Image (cartoon, grey):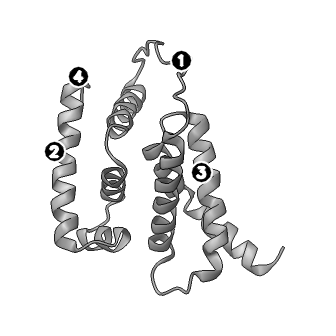
Amino acid sequence: MKETEATFLALINHHKAIIHKVSKMYMDDAEQQRDLFQEIVLQLWKAYPTFKGNSKFTTWMYRVGLNTALVYFKKDKRKVDKIALDENIDVIDVNESESKEEKLAYLYKAVQELNAIEKALIFLFLENQSHREIAENLGISEVNARVKLKRTKEKLQFIIKKNGYEF
């Protein structure tokens, strides 16, 4: 294996949680999440020769991953809606971790109602990015990132309350 490939694979393996989170933010269905994950890795590999190290690898990875998700999301919206078979199955809380998983599922479900930019804002916020880092990743001003993030958080709270999700 070439040194470039080995380095790339090591970086992807170390930071794959970022790609999983982006996939979950933009796709509701597990199969679509896997497809988006693969698409992001492919686009990262194609763009890897252009990575010059002027920023942290993770910052570059966020940018490529979010851009890929936005394009993929737009393509996916044109497809016929799919209905998941397990959509109406009741989940019984057995212990604390299942309760946390359920709350996380509610959050992801609520995030699905946001537009693509709002999803990116929430994702970067949940990744503990500063307003400056969010602005850099999205190509907007820091003030704009701060305002959009505040509005998006308020919208997300409204969606959660509207849908009766319990936190």
Q: Earlier in the sequence, mark 3 or mark 1?
A: 3
Q: Residue at x 32, y 35 (%)?
A: 110
Q: CA distance from mark 4 to mark 2?
A: 15 Å
Q: Which mark is residue 37?
A: 3
Write down the residue under mark 1: 86
State left or right for residue 126 relative to residue 94. left
Name above or below for residue 22 compared with residue 5: above
- Find residue 125 and report its horizontal and vertical position in percent: 30, 57
Q: Earlier in the sequence, mark 1 or mark 4?
A: 1
Write down the residue under mark 4: 164
Verify CB contact (< 8 Å) between mark 3 and mark 4: no
Answer few, some or many: residues within 10 Å of disc 4's Cα (few below 14, many 20 plus, some between 14 and 19).
Answer: few
Amino acid type assigned to the residue bearing label 4 in the image: Gly
- Find residue 70 and report its horizontal and vertical position in percent: 46, 55
Q: CA distance from mark 1 to mark 2?
A: 30 Å
Answer few, some or many: residues within 10 Å of disc 1's Cα (few below 14, many 20 plus, some between 14 and 19).
Answer: few
Q: Looking at the image, which is closer to me, 166 or 149?
A: 149
Write down the residue under mark 2: 154
Q: CA distance from mark 3 to mark 2?
A: 28 Å
Q: Secondary structure at mark 4?
A: loop
Q: Secondary structure at mark 2?
A: helix
Name above or below for residue 51 compared with residue 26: below
- Find residue 68 and report its horizontal and vertical position in percent: 52, 59
Q: Residue at x 28, y 71 (%)?
A: 140
